[in-house]
Amino acid sequence: MAMSKRIQVWFPEEILKQITARGGDLSESIRESLTRYYALINYERKQISGLFTPGELGMICDMSNGTYWTGGMIPLGILANCEDAEQMYYDKWETDRDELLAKLRSLNVTQEHALVDACERWWQAVGHGFNPPINQLLQ
């Protein structure tokens, strides 16, 4: 049986309006919304899992290091980070700038969210002393 835990969460007014618009029990609405969100992120992550080379994934994570992603930043955020990157990073990751940027431009918004989520999880693992293989980032 899955463990449940009661937590206290603060939501901005706009998000709370979105949650309460679904009606019913507040906790259940939040739970269901998060379940849908993670199902969507997992689906899109699988859709793009073969798109990037290990070097491109390393470059993307490197450029995302230290970025605190908020919902409004995600669309085009990874693209902007990689567009602004100096050539030395592309050389480090043996990655072609034009090819990587074209791939990032091809992503839809939900796929961008999935890529950000994967980077966040990867850096979280690294921060806890693990060294997950970069080629498994989107798996």
Image (cartoon, rainbow, N blue to C red):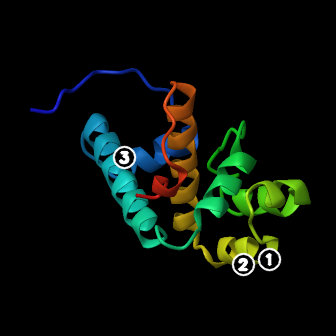
- Name the quadrant containing residue 104: bottom right
**Residue at (71%, 47%) from the top-left corner?**
62
User: Which residue carries the number 1 mark?
Assistant: 98
- Name the quadrant containing residue 43: bottom left
In this view, the residue in front, 59 or 72, is 59
Category of crowding for the residue at label 2, using alpha-carbon neighbours closer than 10 angstroms: few (below 14), some (14–19), many (at least 20) = few
Image coords of residue 28 (percent x, y): 25, 40
Left/right placement of residue 17 relative to residue 4 reads right
Mark 2 touches mark 1? (CB < 8 Å): yes
Q: Quadrant of the C terminus?
A: bottom left
Closer to the eye: label 1 or 3: 1
Residue 34 - label: 3
In this view, 8 is above or below 106:
above
Q: Mark 2 belongs to which amino acid?
A: Ala
Q: Earlier along the polypeptide chain: callout 3 or callout 2?
A: 3
Closer to the eye: label 2 or 1: 1
In this view, the residue in front, 81 or 130, is 130
Residue 102 - label: 2
